[in-house]
Image: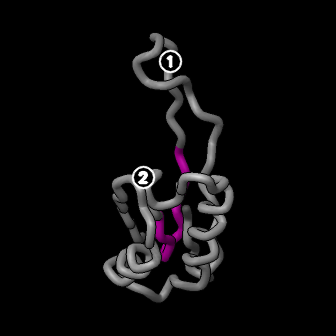
Amino acid sequence: MLLAEDGSVRLLQRDPNILLGLDSSPREDHCLALPQGSTVVLYTDGLVERRHADLTDGLSWLQDTLRDQQHLSADDLTGLLLSQVEDAEDDVALLILRT
């Protein structure tokens, strides 16, 4: 997810390549220029996926939770997200980068 300096949030999504190791197809690199004040939130599936729930619900939750939180430090943003993950059935890992 990309949290902009104005508080807006967008999902950074591209068409996936075939799973690594299944064949020798070339893989694509993706680049994005990050404006000053942007926050990139990288996360594992344990943050947004729940058994018996649609993935889009988890992604919407994350987008809604991040919206207008650009004023928080990376540590506080991590705390906010982790405090709201109640029933994670999988490991959760976060990497938050602020430009």
Say if residue 46 shows up in the picture.
yes
Q: Nearer the viewer, residue 2 or 60?
A: 60
38 is within the stretch colored magenta: yes
In the image, 23: left or right of 14?
Answer: left
Q: Residue at x 34, y 58 (%)?
A: 93
Query: How many numbered callouts?
Result: 2
Q: Would you call the spot at circle 2 few (<14 residues within 10 Å), some (14-19), or many (20 or more)? A: few
User: Which amino acid, mark 2?
Assistant: Thr
User: Which amino acid, mark 1?
Assistant: Pro
Q: Which mark is residue 44?
A: 2
Does dot 2 land on a helix, a strand or a loop?
loop
48 is within the stretch colored magenta: no
In the depicted structure, whether residue 16 falls above or below residue 84: above
Q: Nearer the viewer, mark 1 or mark 2?
A: 2
Which residue extends farthest front?
52
Q: Which percent across, then down, holds residue 70?
A: 51, 83
In the image, the segment drawn in magenta is: 31-40
Reading the image, the residue beneath label 1 is 26
Q: Quadrant of the C terminus?
A: bottom left
Task: Specify the quadrant of the image occupied by residue 24.
Answer: top left
Q: Nearer the viewer, residue 83 or 35?
A: 83
Q: Quadrant of the N terminus?
A: bottom right
Please report whichever mark, 1 or 2, sits nearer to the chain's N-terminal start: 1
Q: Which percent across, then down, holds residue 86?
A: 44, 72
Does dot 1 land on a helix, a strand or a loop?
loop
Q: Residue at x 42, y 81 (%)?
A: 80
Q: Residue at x 40, y 18 (%)?
A: 21
